[in-house]
Image: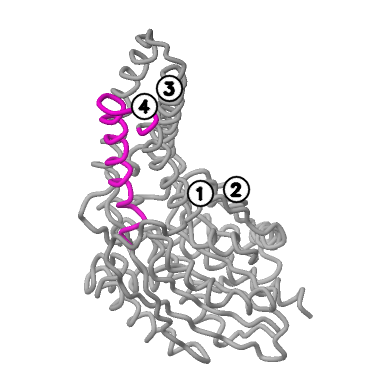
Amino acid sequence: MIGSEIFVGWLTELNVKKIPRIDPSGKRMIKFINNICENIGPRIGGTKEEKDAGDLIYKEMSLICDSVEQEEFTCHPQGFLDFIWIIVALYFGGIITYIFLHPLISSFLFILGLGIYFVQQLLLWEVVDFLYPKKTSYHIIGKIKPSMEVKKLILISGHHDSAYEFPLLSKLGEKSKFLIFGLVFITVLNILLGVLKTILLFNKLTNLFLIDLIQYFSFVPGIILILILGMFLRSNRGVLGANDNLSAVSAVLEVGKYLVNNLPENVEVWLISFAGEEHMRGSKRFVSLHKEELIERNAFLFNLECLSAETFLLATRETMFLAKHSLPLIQIIEKAAIKLELSVTVKPLTFAGSDAANFSRKGIHATTLFGLSTNGVPMDWHTLQDTPERLNGASIACAAELVLQVIYDLDELAK
């Protein structure tokens, strides 16, 4: 794990600045995180607790930013995860119709379930969201102007909502994708067998024992997998989200506190705490509202996730959301990490995702720095153990230092 001794070690060798710009212990950031966790608690998207956390962050930003705003949006948060029960119903409907009605109807229901998974999960379309309650949430956006002419814009972001407990995925980590791939494979097989049986029935062939046998055998693991995913994807318990993702919000604020007295000359900085990241609707709404300006200004989004970590990953892609991130921004961040002698792995993120995906999918320069454990998932990710006392302040401070270095490097490029 990245410790304060290691942090000080690489900082003392910096040519740019011998003295750390951010307190290497991260104590002030952890104090901020502890305050939200103790006085507000879990912050599920669209709840009063999420707004209360945003209000506190608003007050903090008001002390350091030239302007701060709360940006309201509405969405249907439950549509992101609870669509799984629609797929469960369609899968069982496919089994029943295959046995009692017609295999072509069965194949249609399987195709419908697979299609809903693809558009809801991978494309982040909201085709079934209307079935769930509408909620209101608020992003917090603080803007810091440079000391001279604005030539570049960078957004530094985290999110203040927290997740439901994920009993299954948090334990399996990256291995959980094999459950999903397995279910997709079985569903495709169910579809093909239903179509094949329909063709044979159309040609009045009656010896269909082998097709039925394969189909019935495939239903068994399909039922098991889809029930496991449905029942154990999430519980009804919200987590404190100290690492995911108050660690990032605290780093964003710490960066802002340093910038107040050390303004870049030509880079405007937006400090953003997104709401609604855990259902991927919040940043989607933000991009819809600001896309034209961000593209016109050639803006960068440097997003932060789960900064209490054993290792850092700078994402080139987010596989789960079919997002490819900005190579120019990645190169700037990678060079900044080299200057700080901070070890950062640059590669695709194959499990989980971030707000940066919604930016990159719309052609805006973006990427995310992920803090990970050695097993490839964030520390205490979506578990009840994601509490302030388990945080590593030194690694959060490392990430904040990297953000500052990126801002000042970008300022040099803008001159």
Tell which of 105 and 404 is nearer to you. 105
Report the number of discs: 4
Badge 3 crowding class, 10 Å Cα cut-off, few under 14, some 14 to 19, many 20 or more, is many
The amino acid marked with disc number 2 is Thr
**Residue at the spot of label 2:** 345
Quarter holding residue 178: top left
Q: Say which residue label 3 marks.
A: 193
Which residue is under mark 1?
A: 311
Disc assigned to residue 103: 4
Q: Judge depth for marks 4 and 2 and give the one in front.
A: 4
Element at label 4: helix
Q: Could you tell me how far apart the alpha carbons at marks 4 and 2 are, in whole angstroms?
A: 48 Å
Q: Is residue 98 on the magenta stretch?
A: yes
Q: Which residues are magenta?
A: 77-105
Q: Position of residue 244 (x, y in %)?
A: 38, 59
The C terminus sits in image quarter: bottom right
Which residue is at the front of the view, 413 or 19?
A: 413
Q: Nearer the viewer, mark 4 or mark 1?
A: 4
Q: Amino acid at mark 1?
A: Thr
Would residue 287 be found to the left or right of residue 127 on screen? right
Earlier in the chain: of badge 3 and badge 1, it is 3
Residue 224 is at least partly visible in this image? no
> Contact (CB < 8 A) between labels 3 and 4?
yes
Vertical comparison of 43 with 270: above or below: above
The residue most toward the right is 415
Percent coordinates x, y for residue 173 in the rendering: 39, 40
Amino acid type of the residue that numbered disc 4 sits on in the rendered structure: Pro
Specify whether 82 is left or right of 245.
left
